[in-house]
Amino acid sequence: MKSALIVRHVPYEGCAGYRAPIEAAGYALDRIDVADPAFATADLTAPDLLIVMGGPMGVYDTAEHAWIPGEIAAIARRLDADRPTLGICLGAQMMAAALGAAVYKGPEYEIGFGPVDLVAHAASPLSHLAGTQVLHWHGDTFDLPPGTELLATTPAYRQGFRRGANLLALQFHAEMGEDARFEAWLDYLDCPMRRETLTDQYRRLGPAAVRAGQAMIEQWLAGLEA
């Protein structure tokens, strides 16, 4: 089987709904947490597929999280080798930084389910998201890295980019919609009414978001280049 490694920044952010299409494509999934002492020397170029997950920190929070520069450098080495890499939220921001783009605070927090505006590109895997509301939970953004294609936006944020067939970066969370770990995300909210609204959105809109996200990842994996 092919190998896939999940880089996890916090315990409650895993690949969730993306697990099914990744395993169906023949990958054996493993994971490593940045809190693991072994992470400092982990070879992120070796796996056939790397999935870099999200987290509440920013790429600039190096004083609080000393592992960030090393992770970005390891991702840069992998991207230089054009190894298949998927970044989600913080993972997408780390990919942007690894490609030399600026990452910084966005104009406002974007939290809740909503659509993305798709940028027309031939055979974009994000076409599966048309008409679907997906989970947004971010406050940072990035400049579009040189040599990449913008795939989606919202009024305040760039939402996804790719480089060739093997690099896909997604700011939104189409993997989340049926994962009980969402309760841990809600713990960050200090407004009971907002928590109630998001719980209702997750129940109503989450399953469709996951189905669309799975189709997106299935298409992307099928188009990877050796």
Image (cartoon, rainbow, N blue to C red):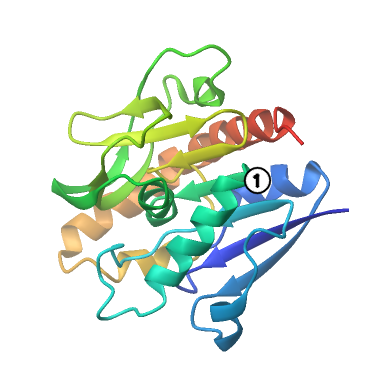
Q: Quadrant of the C terminus?
A: top right
The percent coordinates of residue 225 (x first, y second) are: 72, 32
Look at 51% across and 31% down and name the residue there: 163
> Taking 69 as reference, is 149 above or below it?
above
The percent coordinates of residue 36 (x first, y second) are: 55, 84
Q: Can you see residue 176? A: no
The percent coordinates of residue 45 (x first, y second) are: 65, 58
Q: Secondary structure at mark 1?
A: loop
Look at 58% across and 31% down and name the residue there: 216
* Quarter occupied by residue 67: bottom left
Which residue, given by chain and number where applicable, does mark 1 sit on? 83
The percent coordinates of residue 172 (x first, y second) are: 39, 43
Q: Can you see residue 173? A: yes
Q: Is residue 41 found left or right of 198 in the rendered image?
A: right
Label 1 Cα crowd, 10 Å radius (few <14 / some 14-19 / many 20+): many
In the image shown, does 209 or 195 lie closer to the viewer?
A: 209
Q: Amino acid at mark 1?
A: Arg
Look at 54% across and 23% down and name the residue there: 128
Q: Is residue 62 found left or right of 155 in the rendered image?
A: right
Q: Which residue reaches farthest right?
A: 1
In the image shown, does 25 or 92 lie closer to the viewer?
A: 92
Look at 56% across and 65% down and name the residue there: 7
In the image shown, does 78 or 141 lie closer to the viewer?
A: 78
What number of labels is visible? 1
Q: Is residue 45 found left or right of 172 in the rendered image?
A: right
Q: Which residue reaches farthest left?
A: 107
> Taking 216 as reference, is 28 above or below it?
below
In the image shown, does 127 or 102 lie closer to the viewer?
A: 102
Q: Is residue 208 found left or right of 19 in the rendered image?
A: left
